[in-house]
């Protein structure tokens, strides 16, 4: 008989179908709220983590990235791509999967889809940041770029920040129509708009989430009034930004991890020593967030490995006792740890004796 896999050989695997089942089972707004809390908890213990800018492999049409981190007990990484031209070919701009492992043994503890989980964690992170930076009592958000991330963003701002109205704009009216239809009946007033200027009328929060592999100018300086909070998500690669530089010069800028954001974020347009505040310091009470009603706050989000780590840990806890995972025979784990070859031979043909 070929050897049976050991208990440690099996790694819980959350497929796309399982992730959808889990989020429906728990409720998407509950998941977004819990993810925001989970991520905020890890931002409070920021110092504990191994941090490095993500490892990016660029091509003319996109980027493939690895995003690793560890808190000393658990190691995690995400594989993620960004290919703005993909939607024209019927493919997604962003796809991802990720893994958690035990630092003590190095054995994996979880393998999960992360395309959906990235949309959830990005939305939860954006709304968590806005909880600290957006003007008091904000109720209306402009949502510019109505692609894959957009509904998740709108629902997170509703559940976590109390937004009740979203004003949608996309250069592709079909994307706006889809986003509006998907949000119908979810407790938000949804206003499709014909220009980004129109989408900003009365908005206290502006989210930009467009995909374009270039220095784009989704917002110009004259479009941004005092007192707003800008949640800029789409500029997340070298050579890819969304905001006019003048907006940055009028804003107080908050970032995840400066060594990564200076390469990838809106602030790649500024001098390397332009002052920015790390979001974790605001959360930990070490730096000020919003100081007054006239200040423009900008969360220059690029997405950082700790957010994915928190999200994966949340999923690992959430699947316990549920049917929303399978066990993959993923790690060769022979009885005699040095007899890997013997295990291989026993697994071959003619070994039924
Ligand atoms: N910061 C983060 O943590 C994070 C996480 C996930 C995705 N992203 C980035 O967010 C962006 C959007 O991701 P997605 O998955 O929603 O992409 P997507 O391709 O599904 O949607 C992007 C939308 O932007 C629209 N668009 C492009 N140019 C525009 C313009 N000038 N004005 C208005 N709309 C415009 C497109 O028509 C499309 O509908 C990508 O650049 C992605 O890399 C960032």
Image (spheres, grey):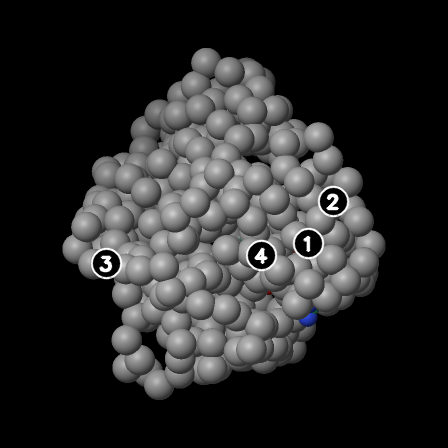
Q: Is residue 197 left or right of residue 159?
A: right
Q: Which residue is mark 1?
A: 168
Mark 1 and mark 3 residues within 8 Å of each other at the beta carbon: no
For the point 73% across and 35% down, the residue is 184
Q: Which mark is residue 288?
A: 3
Considering depth in this image, is 66 or 28 the residue closer to the camera?
28
Residue beneath label 4, please?
202
Q: Residue at x 77, y 40 (%)?
A: 181
User: Considering only order in the chain, which callout, 4 or 1, is on the residue closer to the N terminus?
Assistant: 1
Task: Looking at the image, tell me whether mark 4 or mark 3 is earlier in sequence order.
Answer: 4
Label 4 near ligand 1 (CB < 8 Å): no
- Left or right: where 329 falls relative to 41: right
Q: Nearer the viewer, mark 4 or mark 3?
A: 4
Reading the image, the residue beneath label 2 is 180
**Most foreground residue, 335 or 214:** 214
- Element carrying mark 1: strand
Residue 293 rendering spot, x and y as whole percentages? 36, 59
User: Can residue 342 be seen?
Assistant: no
């Amino acid at each position: 008989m070929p050897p049976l896999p050991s208990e440690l050989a099996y790694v819980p695997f959350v497929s796309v179908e399982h992730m959808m089942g889990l989020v429906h089972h728990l409720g998407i707004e509950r998941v977004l709220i819990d993810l925001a809390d989970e991520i905020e908890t890890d931002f409070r213990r920021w110092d504990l983590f191994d941090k490095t800018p993500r490892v990016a492999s660029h091509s003319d049409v996109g980027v493939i990235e690895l995003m690793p981190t560890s808190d000393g007990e658990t190691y995690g990484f995400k594989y993620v791509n960004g290919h703005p031209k993909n939607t024209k070919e019927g493919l997604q701009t962003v796809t991802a999967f990720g893994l958690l492992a035990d630092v003590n043994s190095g054995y994996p503890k979880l393998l999960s889809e992360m395309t959906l989980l990235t949309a959830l964690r990005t939305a939860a992170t954006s709304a968590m940041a806005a909880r600290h930076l957006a003007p008091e009592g904000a109720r209306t958000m402009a949502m510019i770029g109505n692609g894959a991330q957009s509904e998740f963003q709108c629902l997170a701002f509703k559940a976590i920040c109390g937004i009740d109205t979203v004003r949608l704009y996309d250069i592709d009216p079909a994307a706006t129509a889809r986003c509006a239809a998907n949000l119908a009946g979810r407790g938000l007033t949804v206003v499709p708009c014909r220009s980004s200027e129109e989408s900003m009328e009365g908005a206290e929060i502006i989210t930009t989430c467009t995909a374009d592999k270039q220095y784009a100018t989704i917002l110009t300086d004259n479009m941004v009034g005092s007192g707003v909070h800008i949640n800029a998500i789409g500029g997340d690669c070298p050579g890819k930004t969304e905001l006019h530089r003048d907006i940055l010069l009028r804003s107080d800028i908050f970032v995840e991890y400066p060594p990564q954001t200076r390469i990838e974020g809106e602030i790649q347009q500024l001098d390397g020593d332009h002052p920015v505040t790390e979001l974790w310091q605001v959360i930990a009470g070490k730096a000020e967030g919003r100081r007054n009603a006239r200040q423009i706050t900008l969360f220059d989000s690029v997405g950082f490995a700790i957010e994915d780590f928190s999200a994966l840990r949340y999923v690992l806890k959430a699947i316990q006792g549920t049917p929303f995972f399978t066990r993959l025979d993923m790690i060769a784990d022979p009885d005699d740890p040095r007899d890997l070859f013997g295990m291989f031979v026993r697994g071959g043909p003619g070994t039924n004796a």
